[in-house]
Amino acid sequence: MRAKKYIVWVLLGGWLLLFQSCVTSRKVNLLQASSGSIPTYNDTLNHTAYQIKPNDRLDIFVHSLNEDINNYFNPSFVNRAELETSNTSNADLATYLVDEQGEITFPMLGKIAIGGLTTRGVKEKLEADLPQLFSTNATPISVDVRVVRRYFSVISAVNSGRYPMNADKINIYDALAMFGNLDDFSDRSKVTLVRTMSNGQTVLKTFDLRSEDIIHSEFFYIEPDDVIYIPKMKGYSFGLSSVTNTIAITASTISFAGLIYAVIMRIVN
């Protein structure tokens, strides 16, 4: 009887370990209704325009009907389509680096303070200042401004990567799709976003990615240089990552229990 009880406890312990390892849909599904352990986020309903900060690099293109003005401000030695990710010396010369004081050096205008402005704000500033450099008969000038070489990073225990931001707005789901999604044991309830603000301050924001209310919050849209950190679930090293592993561990538990039972029965008899 003692041998049989021992076998029962061995089997029970194996199955408890198995069930403890299981990952439920509640732990991994996104866009869940906020209730219980899933928090509510209602910080903001609108996407706020990105504010330029030090070390940003800008592509500024001047348009006019005066070819001399165009040729003066717009270098012809680089393809503007390649400025988004190119790190060549020519690309550096064709773009404007924002210094630590939030300024750029622009031809004929010299130092311009643009830190904290949006790209639209820089556009409006240049379109107001540039015509004053030319005669009153000069053709009206328009300016295109965009931030180039924008990246965000994702760090997890399984994989990490740095990804280009080729669109003005990229949300958290876009970022995860570029990353390649998450494995079953990534803790979606404690995702941390590291963000550098336009004033140089670094802030940490921890949120529950499973909440459907993420789409209403400040966490929804990614900004350049954001770092998204996804930890592992507590005790994940004991987890099962696939059905194959589940079957293998279950079979091993039963086989081990059977072996112990056979040994004990031989000793008893």
Image (cartoon, rainbow, N blue to C red):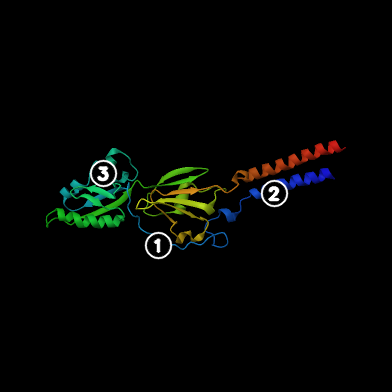
Q: Is residue 1 above or below residue 117?
A: above
Q: Residue placed at 30% from the left, 55% from the top?
A: 119
Residue type at mark 2 is Leu
Q: Residue placed at 54% from the left, 54% from the top?
A: 189
The quadrant the N terminus occupies is top right
Q: Is residue 142 above or below residue 265?
A: below
Tell which of 199 and 8 is nearer to you: 199
Q: Secondary structure at mark 2?
A: helix
Query: x%, y% of residue 78?
Result: 26, 42
Report how far apart the C-alphas of labels 3 and 2 lie in the structure: 63 Å
Q: What residue does disc 2 label?
A: 16
Q: Which disc number belongs to residue 46? A: 1
Q: Residue furthest right?
A: 269
Residue type at mark 1 is Asn
Q: Earlier in the sequence, mark 2 or mark 1?
A: 2
Residue type at mark 3 is Ala
The quadrant the C terminus occupies is top right
- Are discs 2 and 1 less than 8 Å apart at CB? no
Query: x%, y% of residue 224?
Result: 38, 50
Q: Earlier in the sequence, mark 1 or mark 3?
A: 1
Q: Secondary structure at mark 3?
A: helix
Q: Residue placed at 53% from the left, 60% from the top?
A: 39
Report how far apart the C-alphas of labels 2 and 1 lie in the structure: 46 Å
Q: Earlier in the sequence, mark 3 or mark 2?
A: 2
Q: Which disc number belongs to residue 94? A: 3
Report how far apart the C-alphas of labels 1 and 3 lie in the structure: 33 Å
**Circle 1 crowding by C-alpha within 10 Å: few under 14, some 14–19, many from 20:** few
Relative to 47, 235 lies left or right: right
Report the number of numbered marks: 3
Query: x%, y% of residue 124?
Result: 25, 58
